[in-house]
Image (cartoon, rainbow, N blue to C red):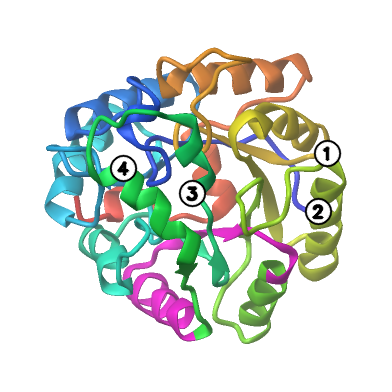
Amino acid sequence: MAKRGKVIITCAVTGSIHTPTMSPHLPTNPDEIARDAIRAAEAGAAILHLHARDPKDGRPTPDGAVFMEFLPRIKQATAAVINITTGGGHGMTLDERTAAARRAKPEMCSLNMGSMNFGLYPMLGRYQEWKYEWEPRYLEMTRDFIFRNTFADIERILKELGEGCGTRFEFECYDVGHLYNLAHFLDRGLVKPPLFVQTIFGILGGIGADPENLVHMKRIADKLFGDSYYWSILAAGRHQLPLASMGAIMGGNIRVGLEDSLWAGRGKLAESNADQVKMARSIVENLSLELASPAEARAMLSLKGGDAVAF
């Protein structure tokens, strides 16, 4: 069974899925990302999962210089664990996707555990006008796109960031096969417990956001990893809080944030990442569970500490 303890809330602040037209509250420049991340940490997020966006038009960017405009500010203002994406944005090369993490040497990075179709194009039908011309093209390209994460790609990230930088990982598993891929690397000794396994539901191309699938992913993870992992739940869009609630009852940790959902209830846009963190915190506390502090999350996940990063 997965390790159980205080509940870690991860907040994914901006991501690379949603575009500026979709919400005026999506942080897209370094000031907004820093401000929103700090407020999310103050609301109770122990881990901040971070992407960068081009300050001019909000498109996802791998530019390490843009990351460095907000990473030191967040570190200075909060004790939260900073977790940098290696997924980047659709169409980026692996070099681009890992550039910021290799420069910053963070305590944590995300690591996608398999190649997959990753369909964002259905969102095209929800909007008639776009703030920037890149947005509809970016969504449409996912109709004929494979999000590449080969065994060689994963090995390279484990070597360069894990071995090379002492970084540990949020292992992102979008389907059952991704759990088996992670078990393969565990069997080879390329990853070390305790694992932080983020099971992801509701992305077109991955496993659906059904309660039955939540139970199934947990059952398979328990079978593969026993007590060598902490389990976390990420559900996209309107499924975010229902599945997070179910997962918390089952002993899981929770990920929220505007990367994963723009909403704070039916028909109500979240005005900040902190809105969603507060909702998740309320769920945890109303279940008579305790929230993990950043220091407790570091201890649970065997992280190297904020003093050992390069920013």
Q: Amino acid at mark 2?
A: Lys
* Residue hosting label 3: 121
Q: Amino acid at mark 1?
A: Met
Q: Amino acid at mark 4?
A: Glu
Is residue 32 in the magenta section? no
Dot 2 and dot 1 residues touching (CB under 8 Å): yes
SS for dot 3: helix
Q: Which residues are magenta?
A: 152-177
Q: Quadrant of the N terminus?
A: bottom right
Ranked by sequence position, the earlier of labels 3 and 2 is 3
Inspect this view and state whether residue 59 appears: yes
Q: Which residue is rendered at x = 27% and y = 37% of the image? A: 75
Q: Amino acid at mark 3?
A: Tyr
* Residue hosting label 2: 218
Q: CA distance from mark 3 to mark 1?
A: 33 Å
* Residue hosting label 4: 135
**Which quarter of the figure has residue 41?**
top left
Ranked by sequence position, the earlier of labels 3 and 1 is 3
